[in-house]
Amino acid sequence: MKPNIGTVDRALRIIIGLGIIAYGLVNHTWLGAIGVVPLLTAFVRFCPAYLPFGISTCGQSGQGGGGCCGGGKCG
């Protein structure tokens, strides 16, 4: 799987995932389990929903640092 999630997208997914989980815990509802999905995609750096649309938030600048896996050297 070629990574298609960049640094900012990854950070947002972690924050949103933790927020959804916290909401589920506070309100004692199973809906918090949905928060696992953005966390999993953030840690794997791959989002299957992006594939059909050809979306990639990986920075392919080649400038070093910053990109999804270090300077745009994805895959």
Image: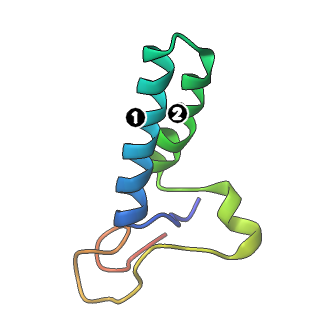
Q: Which residue is mark 1?
A: 18
- Residue at position x 26%, y 74% from top? 66
- Residue at position x 36%, y 65% from top? 8
Q: Quadrant of the N terminus?
A: bottom right
Residue 64 to residue 52: above or below:
below
Residue 35 to residue 5: above or below:
above
Residue 20 to residue 70: above or below:
above
- Residue at position x 37%, y 80% from top? 72
- Residue at position x 34%, y 74% from top? 67
Measuring from the top left, give residue 35's x and y in whole percent.
Answer: 52, 33
Left or right, residue 2 beside residue 66: right
Badge 2 or badge 1: first in the primary sequence: 1
What kind of element bears circle 1?
helix
Q: What's under tag 1, amino acid-wise?
A: Leu
Taking the view exactly as shown, the residue that stands out farthest to the right is: 52
Q: What's under tag 2, amino acid-wise?
A: Gly
Taking the view exactly as shown, the residue that stands out farthest to the top is: 28
Q: How is the image coloured?
A: rainbow
Measuring from the top left, give residue 16's x and y in whole percent.
Answer: 44, 44
Give the mark count.
Answer: 2
Contact between marks 2 and 1 (CB within 8 A): the answer is yes
| Of residues 16 and 44, the one drawn nearer to the viewer in this rendering | 16
| Of residues 74 and 51, the one drawn nearer to the viewer in this rendering | 51
Residue 3 to residue 36: above or below:
below
Q: Which mark is residue 41?
A: none
Label 2 – label 1 distance at C-alpha: 6 Å
Measuring from the top left, give residue 34's x and y in whole percent.
Answer: 60, 31
Q: Which residue is mark 2?
A: 35
Q: Would you identify the image quadrant in which residue 61 lies?
A: bottom left
